Amino acid sequence: MRDEKFEKTMEAWAKHETLSAPKMRPTVEMYRMVEARRKPGILTILLSRRAVWATAVASLMVLMVLYVRLYDPFMLFTPAPAQEVAYVGLRAGFAAQKGVIVIGTSVPSRGGPKKAPPILARLVLQSQEPDSPFVQALDLQNPPDQAVTLTSADNYRLVLEPVKDGYVYVFQFTSSGVLVKLFPNETYNPAQNPVRQGQSHYLPSQPNWFYLGQEKGEERLYIVASTEPLPQLEEGHSQYSAADEGSRKQRLLSTLLEALETIQDTHADTAAGWVFSFHHR
């Protein structure tokens, strides 16, 4: 009983103390202390920013690793392919408002060299200067006696029209000593052999024209027209193009040039060949 009486006495005293105690209110100084605790320090800010940057960099590295592993494990270490040197360039033609001027003789074309089968109705070299309103046209089957000169600023192209279905091969031996196959070559014209009777072919395809590089000297065009395919010309040029620089490449070039220059003798009944030289200054 004594314990019960003691507990009741203590409860009564605690209740009295609670009711009689003054209400506690925070002071201005206490508010300031709380606000100061809430504001992050400089060190906290720096640490938080570093954490964000570290997270971003880590995420980027993870994405790069996943991309490489999923798509191409060696992509980042593969060197870019070497660009082929453009010995005969392409660009759009200049505006010509006053038509075409024919240079040289006006004698009608007789279809090619003497004793050759008539295969091409037209074989024309057109050229234009940057400031000229005219396009100049030269009939390569009946060329003039005077020399023809072009500069790197000039444009030029070939116009071919077969008189019958046949096979046409066009090469240019540049002043740099490189033999370029112009036709058939999808880079310059999508047409393929055999070419069809009565269809005019621009080489390169319109609206493009050829232009020369910076190295000056003699340029030579080789045009061959045949009633039968001449795969040895294309195969010879493929071997020449694939060969490394050196004596073998020069031997292949000499063999191919000889074949182009003697096509009239080796295929007299089926093919006609033209060699046209002009100066690059």
Image (cartoon, rainbow, N blue to C red):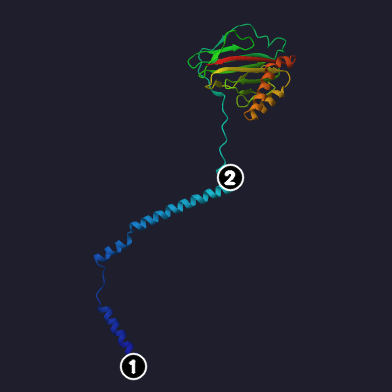
Q: Position of residue 255 (x, y in %)?
A: 68, 22
In the picture shown, does residue 154 fall above or below 22? above
User: Do residues under tags 1 and 2 come within 8 Å of each other at their CB atoms?
Assistant: no
Instruction: Give the residue furthest to the front.
Output: 247
Q: Which residue is mark 1?
A: 2
Neighbor class of circle 1 (other Cα within 10 Å; few <14, some 14-19, many 20+) is few
User: Which of the numbered marks, if any, corresponds to residue 74?
Assistant: 2
Q: Quadrant of the rendered structure where residue 271 is?
A: top right
Give how far apart the Cα atoms at labels 1 and 2 are. 91 Å
Residue flagged by tag 2: what amino acid is it?
A: Phe
Of residues 20 and 242, which is closer to you in this image? Answer: 242
Q: Secondary structure at mark 2?
A: loop
Mark 1 vs mark 2: give the one in front: 2
Residue flagged by tag 1: what amino acid is it?
A: Arg
Residue 196 in sight in this render: no
Q: Secondary structure at mark 1?
A: helix
Q: Position of residue 276 (x, y in %)?
A: 62, 14
Q: Earlier in the sequence, mark 1 or mark 2?
A: 1
Q: Is residue 276 left or right of residue 9?
A: right
In the picture shown, does residue 116 fall above or below 195? above
